[in-house]
Image (cartoon, coloured by chain):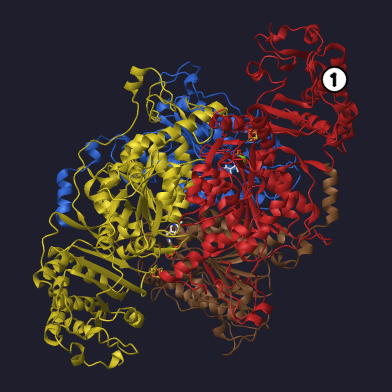
Chain colours: A red, B yellow, C blue, D brown
Amino acid sequence: MAVESILPKAQGAGEAYSGEPRVNDWSIQVATANGSGSQSANLVLLRTIFNMGVPVGGKNLFPSNIAGMPTWFTLRAHHKGFTGRKKEVDLLVAMNPETFETDMAAQAPGTVMLYNTDLKVPGQLRDDLILYGVPFTRLAGEVSPDVKLKKLLTNMVYVGALTHLLGLEMAEVDKAIRRQFKSKEKAANLNIEAVRKGLEYAQANLVKRDGLRIERMNQNGGKIIIEGNHAAALGAVFNGVTVVGWYPITPSTSLVEATMEYLQELRVEPDGKATYAVVQAEDELAAVGMVIGAGWAGARAMTATSGPGISLMSEFAGLAYYTEVPGVIFNVQRVGPSTGLPTRTAQGDLLSTAFLSHGDTKQVMLFPRDPKEAFDMAGSAFDLAERLQMLVFVMMDLDLGMNYWVSDAFVYPDKPLDRGKVLSKADLDRIGSFDRYLDVDGDGIPYRTLPGNEHPLAAYFTRGSGHNASARYSEKPEDYHYIMDRLTHKLETARDYVPEPESSDAGNKIAILAYGTSDLAMAECRDQLRQEFGIEADYLRVRAYPFSRSVHEFIARHDRVYVVDQNRDGQMRQLLTLDLPDDQHTKLRSALHYDGLPLDARSITDAIRAQEGK
Amino acid sequence: MAVESILPKAQGAGEAYSGEPRVNDWSIQVATANGSGSQSANLVLLRTIFNMGVPVGGKNLFPSNIAGMPTWFTLRAHHKGFTGRKKEVDLLVAMNPETFETDMAAQAPGTVMLYNTDLKVPGQLRDDLILYGVPFTRLAGEVSPDVKLKKLLTNMVYVGALTHLLGLEMAEVDKAIRRQFKSKEKAANLNIEAVRKGLEYAQANLVKRDGLRIERMNQNGGKIIIEGNHAAALGAVFNGVTVVGWYPITPSTSLVEATMEYLQELRVEPDGKATYAVVQAEDELAAVGMVIGAGWAGARAMTATSGPGISLMSEFAGLAYYTEVPGVIFNVQRVGPSTGLPTRTAQGDLLSTAFLSHGDTKQVMLFPRDPKEAFDMAGSAFDLAERLQMLVFVMMDLDLGMNYWVSDAFVYPDKPLDRGKVLSKADLDRIGSFDRYLDVDGDGIPYRTLPGNEHPLAAYFTRGSGHNASARYSEKPEDYHYIMDRLTHKLETARDYVPEPESSDAGNKIAILAYGTSDLAMAECRDQLRQEFGIEADYLRVRAYPFSRSVHEFIARHDRVYVVDQNRDGQMRQLLTLDLPDDQHTKLRSALHYDGLPLDARSITDAIRAQEGK
Amino acid sequence: MAVSSAPQTTNRAGLSKNDYKGAPSTLCSGCGHDAITSQIINAYYNLGIKPWEVAKVSGIGCSSKSPTYFLNRAHGFNGVHGRMPSLATGVAMANHKLNIIGVSGDGDSAAIGTGQFVHTMRRNTPMVYIIANNGVYGLTKGQFSPTADAGSKSKGGRANEQRPIDICAMAIQLGATYVARGFSGDPKQLLTLIEGAIAHKGTALLDVISPCVTFNNHEGSTKSYAYAKEHEIRIHELDLIPHFEPIEVVGEFEPGQRREVRLHDGSFLRIHKLEREFDPTSRSQALALCVQAEERQEFLTGLLYAETDRQDLISGLNVVDEPLATLPDERVRPSKAALDKIMAELM
Amino acid sequence: MAVSSAPQTTNRAGLSKNDYKGAPSTLCSGCGHDAITSQIINAYYNLGIKPWEVAKVSGIGCSSKSPTYFLNRAHGFNGVHGRMPSLATGVAMANHKLNIIGVSGDGDSAAIGTGQFVHTMRRNTPMVYIIANNGVYGLTKGQFSPTADAGSKSKGGRANEQRPIDICAMAIQLGATYVARGFSGDPKQLLTLIEGAIAHKGTALLDVISPCVTFNNHEGSTKSYAYAKEHEIRIHELDLIPHFEPIEVVGEFEPGQRREVRLHDGSFLRIHKLEREFDPTSRSQALALCVQAEERQEFLTGLLYAETDRQDLISGLNVVDEPLATLPDERVRPSKAALDKIMAELM
Ligand SMILES: Cc1ncc(C[n+]2csc(CCOP(=O)(O)OP(=O)(O)O)c2C)c(N)n1
Ligand SMILES: Cc1ncc(C[n+]2csc(CCOP(=O)(O)OP(=O)(O)O)c2C)c(N)n1
Ligand code: SF4
Ligand code: SF4
Ligand SMILES: [Mg+2]
Ligand SMILES: [Mg+2]
């Protein structure tokens, strides 16, 4: 039957469901077009489930395009907290005529499909799906005849239908909408009306023929909903960032834009003056140049970018390494190589960032897994950068940066900012000598002074060319060796300063090692391995490069370690291979996922069980 | 005794030498200031020894500066062909007052020192050296009173003194000078006169008190003297380069400048029109952009640069990888990180080049060891680039590029140029279909067409964003996988196309693995290990990355493989670690040298014997 | 060719309009860039240039997506952000028989691409260089670009504080040899300007004000459609007389009110003077006009500058007539004797 | 301060000339860059600026080495090729109390650094920006730079084919607020121009013709010492009256033959007009003068343009009075209550 011909009556018809209900364990996919305003409806859905205390996660899959192209929103609710992406869709909301057929075709038999009967789509509806048709467009039109408004409201109508089908609490939907539209009461009322339309239509016409249901839980106390980019922005603002140089690039743009908003809100003094300076640069080379110039002059400076920007920063990154200038670079990774898939997620820049720049350069990286950690690590990044006098790359990804995450609320950082080894005039008076690049403390980290320091010993000359411990130009082999070996030593010291890994080690032979957003799927993955294949695996989450010594120790305790990488080449595994003692290498296996979609547990479970011969 | 006070009489005084002569086994170091014109004298010296059939090598150690700073020229003659740099100086020619004291202080007792008694240098002469003083400046003044000319001729006077001391054939010196000054007969005569002055003075005043001597051999038949950069330039010109985009940077500048000269000489048609186009770009980003644009349009295009330029090319290098566009990039490596030591040599860009650009990018590299191979590999690079549709990086270094090398003469390349898989209109007529990124042949390498092809199927759209096998824009996971996995496959195929390693395998347990210019010191190093420590080591010279399968096989046959790297981090060892089966990793050891000077055998011998416990 | 003949179904190359089209646009509906695309299609069609003799090049941005939407039968290369000019230069060097058209944005060319833009103007690389100028970064959702006017408002209501870059003034200053400003809402003039650009040999720079209907089309923006429509001042009226069309005698203009600029392929642009006394072959007049326009905040369109006797980059390189890319081996590999001679000299 | 008082051993900061010196130069003897260095030393000394309140920044090139040779007591940063302006911008953002001086070359700023140069001019970043312009890449041994005049000969005798970039014209066009051209062989004027640049608030761009005696000082070069010496035309005579010196009454000029440009620190530049009627506060006059000079191949020196009322980048950012770099924790970390409030809103 062609969709065009479906009668309202037929849409909810059939036997009412009589099996076991599937409570708080399902995934929804909403197919729309981008620019159609479905984001609000999806957020209301997410917020409603969140407010009902059920663990939930939502992810946008959107095109690199401004308007009119297909977009999907996937939502996962799970009582055990497995809120990562799930490959299988339990409930499809089909709103986009362009992708209607392929969306429908992609589903497993028995999937629930809620669709818009007002769509003009040729072709047959599958009869092995559980179908619910609703005239979304018409219902939205009943709320407002305005064409533009109607388009937006159409999305709210499906929230109404879902409210009925899943058993969402209308009071929570109501609250979520009011929150979403904040001060705009009229808009909120219209949207609520649209939801009601959908709800009432569904109540009247749809016989519930599936088991998907929500039940209130109490899992979200003390939690917030936030995008990772906003979290990182808050982290920077609460940890003393003063200088931002940047150039827009998806998916990092919103990190800087949020930083600017928070700065304006939180960092303007009573006289209206700002404790920060932000400049939109002409490109990434200039952006990182500003960061390095500011870091050299003593400021906490940052930029945010993605792969192409990182590549462009390569020359400057080598300058910072060799001249030992601090700075923080948020790399919100997207799919490469080259422009790649700018609106898809990956962890593909580890190798190129670790070795960013020619000639024996090495860089420091942090790997936040969720908004809370993005907030915390933004702080650690500034501390580390100033402590180590290096650039610190915070390796976010699009999934973390641009999706809404349910996260633990952030804890106020009350440790003082670590401004590193900076000598004031008074210090110099006391010490009586200063050699910018000398290892005084035996940790490979020298002391520095800031421009403006009037002590006669303070001024030194910084150069990316060869220099000796006193910062004088030198091409002497022994001077070169001294600086280079001290830099190696500094990176060894860094192992003690970077965030320790998190692990759960029950003494199993097998372990999984993951980092960043992959973590979200790991509990579920380990659960699947245990439940379905009897494989008990320990777990370690790497949080920084260079690796803490405990990463080595963890691997040493295991026989086989599956390294989860969201890239083609197993880049974390490669970095581990280069870092571990040679006799540990045979332990490492790769479990890869690299198609641009957020990681799902099943992919990793499959990769591991196959290698375990199950 | 202060140098100022030395009397001519004292300079050659003492007992005549009566021990065994040291024939054709010594190193000379000439200390001058750059911009002082000593280069001609040094070349005459080199050429004279070469013409006497004795294996010889010369290396310049010069500052990153235009004039006035200390420069050293080291020359090594060795009957067994060990012409790499030697740490110990046998004969020092001290012409630079600025470094006189440190140069003198650095020598082992018993070293011969020929010095300019006209220098105004405070301090004492060492009495444990074999001293020969000659009033070089005064003697030069006798040839020409012109101040500027005198300065230049001073250098020729020491050639004269050395002619006496070493027993060079004056007829060969004469020939070498005439060749050096080509058409400028007057200049040649003046220089010959200066040499004679030095010779006669030495004959009259210097009693030979050392054993260093030259004896005619017959080792240089069929050999030439040339800088590696000129060799690579010739390779490009004889292998069909048509487009050059470049930006000057030491030590790559002379590669392009030589290319331009040879092109002008060899590639202008009778009507005066050129079969090439060279543009000096505004920076390295533009230079590589021109190469990629030209490669895309079907030309053999190249650029040459060094570390900082490579870093700047990073973004574009990823574009070429993902869009599969050919091009050749000569990376004449210098010491990094950052600006580093721009006039010193290193092999420090392997890791950053292999992983140049973000997001799972990989690049192809070739490692020429000497001018002959620079010539040959320039050709292979173009063939490979077009065959693989990739950038190919020819990893030269400053030592190879800017020093004069004695090299086998180049062999005319008579294989036709391999222009790769390009489909003409006729091909398309025949085949009837064209998918730009489809793996038709199962080797991972697709076919391409060139702009201008009028066949209706020919045109396609090239983009650095996601695309499918038909070159259409796509964000689909399966399309992304297809292209990325095919690219991996292509790199596997590349193993069969790249130059095979060279090895000498006598079934020993221990082996040395080196690449590029390190090769020059390896015969001597193996000789030292054998003679002095009884260590017999096989040898493999890697010539390309990705590695040929025979590299794996060679390593598999050995117990311990010492990887020689001219960088701090053992970058070749790291690349091997990432490529070899895990159980082979424990075999690899590093033997490192990274102080900016050309590799000497002793450093590696020491590194190996220490690790072998000897 | 604004002075065009009766409707026809094929052009002088025997091709139909369809042969000049591209894939359907995926830009926002109403985007100015699509209007430019249409005139590019018309221009190549009108001039009867074979699409496969064209190479399309672009950077990154909404504007840079355009080449997908025209001339399907031409090879296209959508490169990296801001680096279209170097790709175009490489293409020109490799195959100077190709007609090169580059499409870029104000962010692509006046921010990250400034260096390549500047040096391409200087070199006079033979190409049509179109900048679809909307004063914002469209693809990254509406940040000010360097061409945003001082005081122009963002969608969020913030005023731009920076002085704008005047792309045309820069191009003229730097040595571009055909510099014009168009408006995507003025298709007739735009078509003529593009036709002239194609007929010109050297860098033909077209700064086309092309409103971003999604992020920069609001009240307070000086790059909105409404603002541009209201403020556009054509400095003259233009016709292109293509080299293959007999010159018609037109008598309706006062003497002295008309002049012609002869282009390289034999076509010429006929300029009907309007209000201002202005000679587009004078570099200093053109620059003065730009300064004045900036001071008076005027939006001028038309041909600002044309210099038809300056050598372009490729002519200066004096290359052989055939494309370098596909010369046969024997023309790009010197003889064995040549190598032997060099070897002998080095022995 | 060309109109200077009797010789003195310390300046008003109580420092001697020695306190303004740097390490001995390692440039070729006679290099124009060293002559610029001397006048930089003199200027800071004369104005009595404390050297530790200065930050020196540069790119890569012979010219970019200069900061080592002056103001030893100032911190210096010799960055990467062409990127001095972004480092300088970062320094200005971090600590706006510093007096920033950037030294660059024509290759550094007009080739690889074009983008950063252009956008720094636009932003009016407060700094003195000196380009030691010799028409070649000195450090890489004499290739033409983009400022080499068309037709100027290389040491090897090859003529440059490219149109030159006029750094001053570009800077004026782009919005720099103090633009002057000097000549390293005209130390008196150069000193005044540098002093004026230091006193100016905003980007003060100085294009100083500075012959490369090793690679571009031959017959046929238009950047040789002899050529510049012979062809220099001072568009006016200049004096700087520093803010701390009482204005002397000078009566020797005809009325109308003199004008003053008041600078931000209260100093002013007194301009004695020479041949041309020219107002350096008019952007269009300044541009016209540049075009004319290019057409006539004139080498003009002097203050080409000054705009003293435009807001600089840092003023536009409205930052607190103290340097951002060293604000105490409590001023750069909002309160716990602020975070709690945000968390509550997100719950
Ligand atoms: C190196 C790099 N930096 C940033 C980006 C992100 N980016 C894509 S398009 C764009 C700006 C486009 O603006 P414009 O050229 O004006 O084009 P428009 O979209 O306005 O037509 C930016 C910053 C990128 N793709 N690459
Ligand atoms: C990225 C990069 N490319 C190229 C170089 C090589 N390089 C060093 S200085 C220089 C040009 C300097 O010219 P200019 O700025 O005019 O200074 P000058 O030496 O003439 O004073 C170049 C190309 C470099 N150091 N870094
Ligand atoms: S965002 Fe703006 S520039 Fe981009 S397609 Fe839409 S309207 Fe055009
Ligand atoms: S090479 Fe030229 S620019 Fe460089 S120091 Fe020497 S004279 Fe000066
Ligand atoms: Mg734009
Ligand atoms: Mg220069």
Near mark 1 (Cα within 10 A), the count class, few <14, some 14-19 or many ≥20, is: many
User: From the viewer's perspective, is B254 left or right of B185?
Assistant: right
Residue D257 can be seen in this image: no
Q: Say if disc 1 is inside 8 Å of ligand 3.
A: no
Residue C193 can be seen in this image: yes
Which of these two is toward me, C23 or D183?
C23
Query: Residue type at mark 1?
Result: His
Residue that appears at 60% across and 81% down: A456
Q: Position of residue B189 (x, y in %)?
A: 13, 73
Establish if D130 lies above or below C5.
below
Which of these two is toward me, D324 or D172?
D324
What residue is disc 1 on? A164
Q: Quadrant of ligand 4?
A: bottom left
Establish if A303 lies above or below A608.
below
Which of these two is toward me, A152 or D253?
A152
The secondary structure type at the circle numbered 1 is helix
Instruction: Give the image quarter of residue A452.
Output: bottom right
Establish if A140 lies above or below D172.
above
